[in-house]
Amino acid sequence: MKLKNFKQYNDDLNSVKVKNLNGSVTNKRLYNPCGSWIKHWEKLANKTNSGCGVQGCSTKTKIEGGHVIESGSDDDKHYIVPLCDKHNGGPDGEEFTVKSDDLMSAIECKA
Ligand SMILES: [Zn+2]
Ligand SMILES: [Zn+2]
């Protein structure tokens, strides 16, 4: 697949706008028995991460499991997406576009 087509595909069918949840609030609310949120993401996704999930970001190193909520959603459901340290460390509420397939529930799972 050509790269320019991939972006179009993403925009049309498979992308979702999310808001960054930052700070310790999320960590206090949710206990994570997986050790780290990126490990939790990889367990639920059943694959290793392939870099920052933000559309247009090509960072492949220092990937963390970032907490996000879906933009415009009222249900306050937390998701984990692979984020580079720059995106994960961005301001609370910062919006970015990710692939909907990359959203994994930030639920407690059994270790
Ligand atoms: Zn887990
Ligand atoms: Zn990034």
Image (cartoon, rainbow, N blue to C red):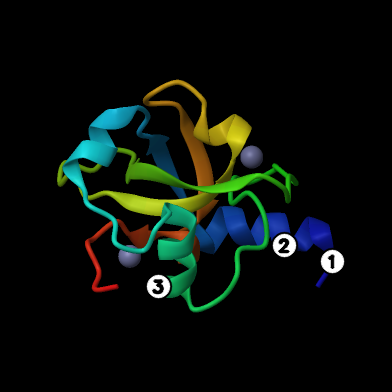
Q: Marks 3 and 1: which is nearer the front? A: 3
> Between 38 and 3, which is closer to the camera in this rendering?
38
Residue 44, label in figure: 3
| Quadrant of the rendering where the C terminus is positioned | bottom left
Q: Mark 2 falls on what kind of element?
A: helix
Tags 3 and 2 touching, CB below 8 Å: no
The location of residue 35, given as percent across then percent down, is: 39, 58
> Between 57 and 34, which is closer to the camera in this rendering?
34
Taking the image as shown, residue 27 lies to the left or right of residue 45, namely left
Residue 6, label in figure: 2
Taking the image as shown, residue 11 lies to the left or right of residue 78, namely right
Tags 2 and 1 touching, CB below 8 Å: yes
The location of residue 110, given as percent across then percent down, is: 24, 73
Taking the image as shown, residue 91 lies to the left or right of residue 109, namely right
Q: Amino acid at mark 2?
A: Phe
Earlier in the chain: of badge 3 and badge 1, it is: 1
The relative height of residue 108 versus residue 43 in the rendered view (above or below) is above
Query: Would you say the beta carbon of the disc 3 residue lies within 8 angstroms of ligand 1?
Result: yes
Q: Amino acid at mark 1?
A: Lys
